[in-house]
Amino acid sequence: MATAGRVRSSLSLFSKVIKSESVASRRSILHPQLSKNFATASGQKEEKVKVPVALFGGSGNYASALFLAAVKANSLEKVETELLELAEASKRAPTFFQFMKDLAVPADTRVKAINDICTQAKFSEITKNLLVVLAENERLRYLDSIAKRFVELTMAHKGEVKVIVTTVIPLPPEEEKDLKETLQDILGQGKKVKVEQKIDPSILGGLVVEFGQKVFDMSIKTRARQMERFLREPINFGII
């Protein structure tokens, strides 16, 4: 009961803090080679399409270029399914997983293997082009990361917002409902909040809420550390 009470208290605090925050959007720089290849693959007239959220880093650039190509080809759901299926399958196939990580494998061998896989799996040209580019540039080992970033874009495109809530115990249904309603108020209509709960006893209590690029840490562990730092600071009584 005491733990649940602390969760409710933290949730109330989160509600107050989040309402003072604003969400900013930034522009992303896309991988030039990937964008060119995808534009050729789509075979359509160039359209003005933008990524719904800015992603950075290598995986973010690949995911962004893939998203633009998939939208233009009207194949967003198909590409997402193919990418996730391959990323998940690679985790269950040690040989293929090692193949993706091994930089000693010649580029032409990697490309041939990827082409064979795409043909057998009947992957779309968009997905195939991504994998070929990754194989040519020794980036297949980043497939899982790229898939996760791509999902971020598809969720944003569909108006879905993934929220990760970390607590010591599972968040009660009524508290999850309160959290969703709070975020819904902030994000506005047209957005769908999807909550993913994580259990981590090491935070001692309270909760940590993550969504977008924001992290709201209201855990007892963090508060204790802050208090410890405060108590270690020398006391200045001043001189009158």
Image: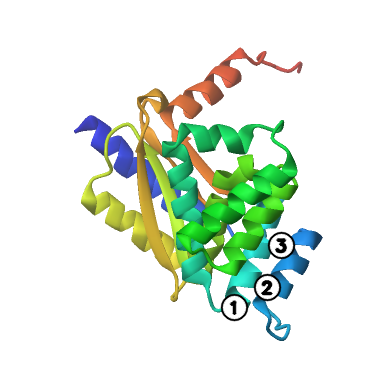
Local packing at callout 2 (Cα closer than 10 Å; few below 14, some 14-19, many 20+) is: some
Residue 22, image x and y in percent?
60, 61
| Mark 1: amino acid | Ala
Residue 73: mark = 1
Query: Which mark lies nearer to you, 2 or 1?
Result: 2
| Mark 2: amino acid | Ala
Local packing at callout 3 (Cα closer than 10 Å; few below 14, some 14-19, many 20+) is: few
Q: Residue at 45% of width from left, 61% of height from top? A: 81
Reading the chain from its start, which is encountered first: label 1 or label 3? 3
Q: Mark 2 points at which residue?
A: 41
Quarter-wise, where is residue 133 in the image?
bottom right
The answer to whether residue 20 shows anywhere in this view is no
Q: Name the residue under label 3.
A: 26
Task: Check whether the beta carbons of the residues at disc 2 and disc 1 lie within 8 A of each other.
Answer: yes
Query: Which mark lies nearer to you, 2 or 3?
Result: 2
Name the residue nearer the viewer: 148 or 202.
148
Q: Residue at 56% of width from left, 58% of height from top? A: 150
| Mark 3: amino acid | Arg
Name the residue nearer the viewer: 88 or 31.
88
Looking at the image, residue 149 lies above or below residue 223: below
